[in-house]
Amino acid sequence: MADKEATVYIVDMGISMGEKRNARKESDLDWAMTYVWEKITSTVATDRKTAQLGVIGLRTDRTENELDSEDSFQNISVLQEISQLQLPGLKDLRQKVKVNDTADGDAISALVIAIQIITKHCKKLKYKRKIVLVTDGRGSMDADDISQITEKIKSDEIELVVIGVDFDDPDYGFKEEDKDPEKAINEAMLRTLVEDCEGVFGTMQQAIEELGIPRLKTTRPVPSYKGQLTLGDPEQFDSALCIDVERFPRVMVRRPLAASQYVQRSDLSNGHVSTQSSATMMPDADGADAGPTSADGHTLTSVRNARTYQVLDEEAPGGKRDVSRDDLAKGYEYGRTAVHISESDLNVTKLETQPGLEIIGFVPWSTFERYMTMSVSCVVIAQKTNSKAIMALSSLIHALFELESYAVARLVTKADKEPLITLLAPSIEVDYECLLDVQLPYAEDVRSYKFPPLDRVVTVSGKQIREHRNLPSDALSAAMSDYVDRMDLSDLGKDEEGNPAEYMNMTDTYSPVLHRIDQAVRWRAVHPTEPIPPPYEILTRYSNPPEELIARAKKKLEKLIVAADVKKVPPKVRSRKRNRNEIRPLSGLDVGALLLGNKSKKIKISRENPIPEFKQALDSTESEDSVYDAVKQLSTIIETQIKDSFGDIAYGKVVEELGVMRDEMIDLEEPEAYNEFMRSLKGKLLGETLGGDRKDMWYEIRKNKLGLIERKSSDRSHVDEDEAKAFLSSRS
Amino acid sequence: MAEENRWKPPGEEEEEEEDEVDEAAYKSARDAVLFVVEVSPSMLTAPPPTDAKKQERDTPTLAALKCAYALMQQRIISNPNDMMGVLLYGTEETKFQEGEEARGGLAHPNCYLLTDLDIPAAGDVKALKDLVEDEEESKKLLVPSTESVSMANVLFCANQIFTTKAPNFTSRRLFIITDNDDPHATDKALKSSAAVRAKDLYDLGVIIELFPISRSDHEFNRSKFYDDIIYNASPTDPEAPAPVSGGVAPSLTSDGISLLASLLSSINSKAVAKRALFSSVPFEIGPGFKISVKGYIIFKRQEPKRSCYVWLEGEKPQIATGVTTQMADDTARTVERVEIKKAYKFGGEQITFTPDEVSGLRHFGDPGIRIIGFKPLSMLPLWANIRPSTFIYPSEDDYVGSTRVFSALQQKLLKDRKVGIAWFVARKNATPVVAAVLPGAEKVDENGAQIIPPGMWLTQLPYADDIRQNPETNLIRAPEGLIDRMRVVVQQLQLPKAIYDPRKYPNPALQWHYRILQAMAMEEDLPEKPEDKTIPKYKQIDKRAGSYVIDWGRELQTEHEEWQKDNEVTTSVPAKRSAPSGKDLIPDRSKKAKTATPDGGPTDAEMKHAYMKQEHKKMTVAQLKAWLQGKNMSAGGKKAELLERVEEFFENK
């Protein structure tokens, strides 16, 4: 577990904090609170009982602290005692933080109070103690006993952070012009204090800017395997090699905060619910006083999943009946056969294995394809306290490195876990050595999908061609090569010393959704009624090539575009007629002609073979009447199939036929033919005139989005998006 | 069914349900394969005996049925929701779907539906197994009819099977296995009507795959009949690349490879229906310069299907399907999906957003792959990996010319060993990821059949948030002598052909799971010992490397004792080392070790200094390599070559 933390924020709320300075649109207090709220909400978000914080108001109208009888401690209020802060407490706090009318109150005294409440709370226990002072330095400060304070802060190991509004910071590059002389003195004093305490002293602008760089969470490494790395079988052969090793995660995806499901509580009085219901998602505008999210939170209740089980039963209505969970046994599916396995035999299908990391053999780097890696990666190091194992593993790491080879190994992390095949790669850094480990595919994990070659075209006759519209010309290859070289990222970035370095290193990229949701949740907790601010710049920085690079490669790109001669396919060209006429078997035989020869001019669509015959009927005609006739024939078949369907047996067929009809009518630009039928079909289904209750069939139509053809799909449709939506969702 | 979604975090299943996006939204993403096997005197004649030992001598029909049997077992594991059936034609007996007899059971004479198209049941597997393993059984059934069979009829029979049993599937395929290249040589009308029926199948979206068998005296000639039957592309995917031939046509000539083996290999290459993970996603190579690509899952961890509940009270065990209803926690009333709101827990309560806000939070641009720039492959460390890569291949659907541009890029990256770095959004509102775009060359096996297709691969890279710190440990660099001895060991034990070939390693746990289930389902004896090809070949390791390992072990012993002497200060308190408090000791010691043994990766300054004093020749190979790699220079070759490169570097400065 992480250490216990106690942090006290001292916030200057004096009258001067109400000013808007330096062309900012918000008051100094609001501006400074951006920083404080981010810090506080980050702590609240951890949901850790051990992450505790307190807040002290400085230069408040009232005085509320344990030393309030003394003169020097006036106008200081403890707004929040040190404790785990929850959402209600956060809301209370929001009410208390506002600009006061006074200019009195001593920041140094506030520090003393902060030290005092920390001491009282933490006693002698192990805590990470921290005080954050946020001020504009425009109040009067009494520096008399400051050396004592420094002493105390150091002896208690309290980290002191002072962030000042418009404080000068030459390192960061900020200097306030025409600075108030008193402020200058205060700044200097605070700076000395912080330096003496080895704390952090900074200007607000920088602090706020740095909020845009997400903080990384460190996770204590937990081994995923502890055991031996072997070569050979130590039980059978004396020549087997064994090294005690441990394996830790190297890459592990951090997931964004997950949303949970809630619904409106129903045990509240109706009146209350109705006023809230429409606005629950968006807390009330007057929420500032009532604490809207709190009210909102109380109107929600969580959603529970209840599972029931059904089996097929031809006699039951709907063909299915519920069975009790108690009547069910565990089992597995083998194809569509249920294989029941008694409770005591449940492990029978499990392969018995012994834990181990066993080397199968070695492969050179050159034959290994990088795209074969299947999983997140781990590091394998020797047992930490075993110097012999460390030296032994080091020799393997170096041998692999010098031979430019990987080891392939079989890994069983725990007894009876399934074996994995992993690739072990040597990693040597200046002060670190390890094997990197990433999983490889099994035979079953590779699908054999075939694709034509990209560097040549093979014709049906087996001839290989090197010049073809699908192959790049020399000009295109050259243009591509120039462009790729120009778009090089390998030295576009800067390292800490300002030297050219890799641009967009993985350690510079932050998970956008993770931090965006985190940001939004914390924002909403403090600002229930305000819209969410845009994402931090860093989250979208790498979604486009850097401007500098684009400018540099502009000429090359223009050349490439010319050489490539790529044309966007206009949506209309995919029309039916064009494609259909080109459809021939490999021999080129005109089957359409055969069809016409065989059958009478007007194709009759049969129930046995409706889809091909429907398509062929459409092929053989140009006239609108015949199209309508074909649709009519297929419609009749569809209705009969539904009528005759035992349960849902014919629904799959009907869905397919409707899908084909819909697609063909879109292609032929006859949306009304389909829509007309669909309207009438819906009426019949819901009117139960096609063999009783056919609601499930209507559900299939909805599920498969086979409703009316809307204008988006076909210009000639009179149905707009709303109408199509309403058609599918309404029950009449 | 759809793949489990690997590009998204859990907990959002409802928002992004579909995964294998298909143009035809109303279709269910499943595959149905119908084997159509001819039974005729020639198909029932075994090939002539050959010199090759252990040569299997199956008749073509039997070999075909063995393939079907093998494929059926394989698909139960790999595609548990997909369907399969077996239809024989040319048999004396006639049999069609149950219950169909009444409606003129002889509609398809001399067609024998051995296994109706469905998800295979244990009974289907057993029936096939009995047929291929029990000679009596096969003799009874595999009797050729004296009448000749109309191919039109066979094709229509298949049409009916697909229409009734697998309506609405995205993929329906007919595997025809025959040695007769001209079934209607003399009857033009029958030939035409077969062509018409084949067109019906095409219009239905059924793809015909032909597995022709040549005889020693007769080369199968497709142009006589089958070129009228088979169409080039699938109708659902008019732009699909032309079919890649599955190697040579299986033949009965005695060229060492058995008919069964070659048939099995060509059928295996078609075992899985090609399904796109995403279609026609824009691939933006530069600002305003787009082509379209499709994505495919080629690598995916195959897991056993999860356990289920079985209802035992009925006549035969039945799988109970679970239905989830959602209830409000306070009153246990059932709630509708539209009522459900998403909220985030924060500070002990919930923070809510409007649905628009929720989707806005996830929105980081439209779907697409956008190249940010390029880097050398060496800047992509092996550990930078999260999940299997996605294969991408160009599509002409949205941009004509995509293929040639894609090809130019792929070849350039292959040649210069570079990778693209891309911003990748797979679907609307999908979590954006940073991916490496890796070029992949085509790989073929010894027969010229494709193993890995040519194209590019999207490898998701970790964000800073996903990268864990290395655990703290000591550094004790092995001395040169010890490394030398280990090098010899490594050199003895290269994998065959110096590659890791996944095809050689079936997943032992997965295979065992299904073997046991199969035995239980078919009420056979349970197998005793699993076959596990992942277990290292201990004997070979001992034989080839044993003595070298022992050498290494002795050296380790000596060197370690030596090291302990040098590091006496810390090792003089051995009790502390194993105690947990010894932790404090560790960092100290590592510093000592660092100075005791020279560093692996010298800094530029160190290297320059060494070069000036001509001391760089004293550096170890590892140090030189580490430094060269840091400079993105080749780190291969002998020490002399490495030194040369270092010298070159400073000379040119």
Image (cartoon, grey):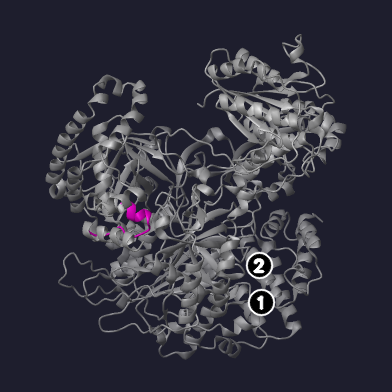
Q: Chain of mark 2?
A: A
What element does badge 1 sit on?
loop
Q: Is residue B629 visible?
A: yes
Return the mark for residue A27.
none
Q: Magenta residues, as a range?
A: B626-638
Helix, strand or loop under label 2: helix
Residue B635 covered by magenta stretch? yes
Location of mark 1 (residue): A570
Vertical placement of B606 versus B262: above or below?
above
Q: With B569 as the anchor, is A457 left or right in this view?
A: right
Instruction: Give the percent coordinates (x, y) of residue A340.
Output: 44, 41
Q: Amino acid at mark 2?
A: Gly
**Front residue of this view, candidates A571 and A254:** A254
Residue linked to disc 2: A659
Residue type at tag 1? Pro
Q: Nearer the viewer, residue A626 or A132?
A: A132
Magenta region, mostly helix, strand or loop? loop
Task: Give percent across and percent down for residue B254.
Answer: 21, 75
Q: Position of A619 compared to A126: left or right?
A: right
Q: Residue at x 43, y 71 (%)?
A: B411
Q: Which residue sits furthest top?
A: A69
Q: CA separation, marks 1 and 2?
A: 23 Å
Query: Quick one: label 1 or label 2, which is nearer the N terminus?
Result: 1
